[in-house]
Each structure stands twice: as structure tokens, then as C-alpha cells.
Amino acid sequence: MTINVGVLTAGGDNPGLNAALRGLGKSASYVYDLQLIGFYDGFRGLLHDRHIMLDESALSGILTLGGTILGTSRDKPSKMLVGGKIQDMRGAMVETYKKHHLDVLVCIGGGGTQKNAFSLMDKGLNILTLPKTIDNDIANTDVTLGFDTALGIATEAIDRLHSTAHSHHRIIMVEIMGHNAGWLALGSGISGGADVILIPEIPYNPESIAQAILERSRSGKHFSIIAVSEGAMSMEDRKREKQLLADKDAAKEKKDKEKAKAALEEFYSGQAGRTMKLSRDLERLTGLESRVTILGYVQRGGTPSARDRLLGSELGTTAAALITEGVHGMMVAIKGQEVKPVPLKSVVNKRRLVPPDHIWVETARRVGTCLGD
Ligand code: F6P
């Protein structure tokens, strides 16, 4: 009997999503008896039943395309802006699921999507998820779809910044995405040979960074490249953050709670300016000129790397095989050489950060890279 499968992509886009859709859809029609229906723009398309039948022809020629042919959004099923109000729209999504007689819904996305998909399980839907994000921060999988492409783009940017930093004898700071995890900055920093790498997991001291730069100058290297993760913070700021979080937890009265929450929000809104501030501090502390490059969305755009095409294909085809076996309530994870399901419950509300003793941290230190501490 044909199995009806819905699929959506949610959260930030990244290269490799189409490879996963193609892997799922092609194996659904070539090998398994699955009928695939795609919903547009993440959970919003599921709500409004905006869909496309993903037959073999709809999936042709998309392997090398970046982004997602389904579109995406950051909508949360239980807190969705509809008619000017934030509402729990899960009930309406269940209706769409039933209307199409779906047996399972595949949700492809990052940490937020895993959580949102899990919240639909509470409403009785059969869910299977695939892990994708350039941040590489999803729990219980070794790697996420899209990370490898972004790693390549950030590394190439660091390569290119070397010649201009060298010619002008400047410090160049390159801000790299990754949300609150340092995988992308650390990986590309090592691959591109950055002199300083700053990640959220290791709070930095501007003085230590300045010392490392001055040391390079003394040895005749009058330029430095700093790969800084968008979530990196100084030791001082990390202390302040801890205090604000403690204040929020300790607040009893409603008005104190709101005050503490507002203070925390204001603190986080300052994150965007932290790289610029550090750049100014380093100019003052070293006497060198400093410039900042924010890589931004370039890291999420364009053609997927060969590794992400392969990974997307592995994840998509394995999802089709698991659906045929009746598996749901799981995320399809990468574990060593294996692609296998792990309970979705073990993934939600967790973030995979760079452990302090990770081989990449050791490697960076062993080649003399300053990590800011
Ligand atoms: O999660 C992927 C990511 O690109 C993060 O690295 C970044 O912090 C965030 O998304 C940007 O979000 P948005 O696309 O909503 O601006």
C-alpha cells in the first residue's frame, strides 16, 4: 500500500537541502512505494495547505541548487503570528496532515525546527526529522547538513583576506556565523590559518589577543587575521551575561521579572556591535590599523559542496527507507560512518557546543593560534 509522506524545510536555508529533498523523493519513487507532498515555506505552508506533489520530474536538476525549492520560514507552530496575533496553530496543521492522509511528516531543519517538529508529535503526528544548519550545533549527530559548504566559503574568505591584510599591515577581523556555537569559526579559522580564533565557548580577553598580535609583529609578521564567531564574547561580557541570567532566575515579582528580561534582551542586542568594539580596542592596544568583514548570508548561499550533496542524499534516502520500515519520532543522524535514527526527544532543547578538549581546539593551540584566553 502506498505510504503518504509530507515534507517541509524550516528555519534558515542552506546548501544541501535540495539534495536531501531529491534523495527522499527519488528513492520514494524508484525504490519504495511512497507518495511525497512538499509544503511551502516551512510550517506556514502546512498551516495554509500550500503544497506541491514532489514526483520524480519535480525533483530533477535540483541536486546542485542552493537554498530550498520549497522555501522556508522561521514560523513556530505553537507560537505563530496569524491575523496580527501570536497563536498556537498546531490544530490547523493536524487538519492539513489528515486531509492529505499523511502517514508521516518529514521536517528538515535546525535546532528550532527539531523542537517545533517535536511539538507536533504531542498533537499525534508521526514525525521524522533531518538535521540541517550551517551552525553544526544539533545534539546527537556528528554533523549537520550545510556545515561543510559554509566551512568552505568561510575558509575561502579567510584565504582572500590574507593578501589584503598582508599588503596593508593590518589586523582584519572576519565575523563568521554559527549562532552560539563556534564550529564554523573554529573549523574555518584552522583551515584558513587564522592567527586568532574567537568562539563563544572560550570567552576572550582583549589584552591576550593584543599580546599575540604584538608578538607576531615582533617576529616580523605585521598583519593578523582574526576569525571571530558571531556569538563570541569577552570574559567581562560573559560574566555580565551570567549575572543577568541569575537576576532573571531570582526575580519573583512580575515587574522584576520583566525588568530582568528587558536587561537581558538589551545585553543580547549589543552582540552585533561586539566585533566592532573589539576591533577598536585592538587598534588602541596594538597601534595597528584594524578592519572588520562580516561574512553574513554569503555563508548560506550558493552551490552545495560535494560533501553536502552526498550527506543530503544519504539523509534523504535513509529517511525514505526508515519510513518504509514504519520508523517515526526520530531524527536521522550521522554517527561515525553510519546514518541512523536517534530519538527526537534526545535532540530537542539541547545545543551541541564545541567541547573545551575537542581535537579542533587542541589543533588550533598546537599550531600557535591564539584563542583569546
Ligand atoms: O542558524 C543558521 C544561521 O545562519 C545562524 O548562523 C545565524 O545566527 C542565523 O541563522 C541568522 O538567522 P536569520 O536567517 O533569521 O537572519
Image (cartoon, rainbow, N blue to C red):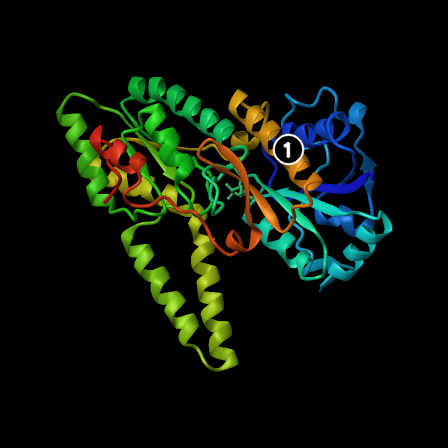
Pinpoint residue 319: horizontal percent, then vertical percent.
Answer: 64, 37
User: Foreground: 96 or 294?
Assistant: 96
Identify the residue at the far bottom of this view. 253
Pinpoint residue 278: horizontal percent, then vertical percent.
Answer: 32, 43
Can you say whether 293 is above or below 51 in the image?
above
Pinpoint residue 214: horizontal percent, then vertical percent.
Answer: 17, 32
Judge whether residue 15 can be spotted in this image: no
Residue name at image x 71 percent, y 61 percent? 123
Residue name at image x 66 percent, y 22 percent? 63
Pinpoint residue 21: horizontal percent, then vertical percent.
Answer: 68, 32
Can you say whether 205 is above or below 156 in the image?
below
Query: Which residue carries the number 1 mark?
Result: 316
User: Foreground: 17 or 223?
Assistant: 17
Where ligand 1 lies, by image quadrant? Answer: top right
Can you say whether 110 is above or below 250 in the image?
above
User: Foreground: 373 or 142?
Assistant: 142
Amino acid under disc 1: Gly
Residue name at image x 27 percent, y 29 percent? 195
Q: Answer left or right for 48 relative to 159.
A: right
